[in-house]
Amino acid sequence: MYGWLWRHLPGGTAAKALQAVLLVALVVALLLFAVFPAIDPLLPFNEVTTR
């Protein structure tokens, strides 16, 4: 998959590296700000019970 992505990014090595870093940052931001908050209510981590 990484090879496929690297071959399909336009530009030289430096441009491809910058684009790859930006794509990783975009995926991380999407996960942190959209996906994880959306699924947080569905996770059982806040349901603490003690006996």
Image (tube, rainbow, N blue to C red):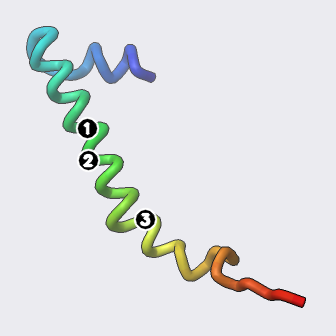
Q: Is residue 18 left or right of residue 40?
A: left
Q: Is residue 26 left or right of residue 16?
A: right
Q: Earlier in the sequence, mark 1 or mark 3?
A: 1
Q: Secondary structure at mark 3?
A: helix
Badge 1 density bin: few <14, some 14–19, many ≥20, Cα 10 Å: few
> Disc 2, disc 1: CB below 8 Å?
yes
The quadrant in which residue 44 appears is bottom right
Q: Is 27 placed above or below 11 here?
A: below
As measured in the structure, the alpha-carbon distance from the residue carrying label 1 to the one carrying label 3 is 16 Å
> For residue 35, which numbered disc appears in the image?
3
What residue would you read off at disc 2? 26
Badge 2 density bin: few <14, some 14–19, many ≥20, Cα 10 Å: few
Q: Residue at x 56, y 82 (%)?
A: 41
Q: Residue at x 20, y 22 (%)?
A: 9
As measured in the structure, the alpha-carbon distance from the residue carrying label 2 to the one carrying label 3 is 12 Å
Q: Residue at x 39, y 57 (%)?
A: 31
Q: Picture coordinates of residue 23 (x, y %)?
A: 25, 38
Q: Secondary structure at mark 1?
A: helix
> For residue 23, which numbered disc appears in the image?
1
Q: Picture coordinates of residue 29 (x, y %)?
A: 29, 54
Three-letter residue code for mark 3: Val
Q: Is residue 4 left or right of residue 41?
A: left
Q: Secondary structure at mark 2?
A: helix
Q: Earlier in the sequence, mark 2 or mark 3?
A: 2
Placement of the N terminus among the 4 image quadrants? top left
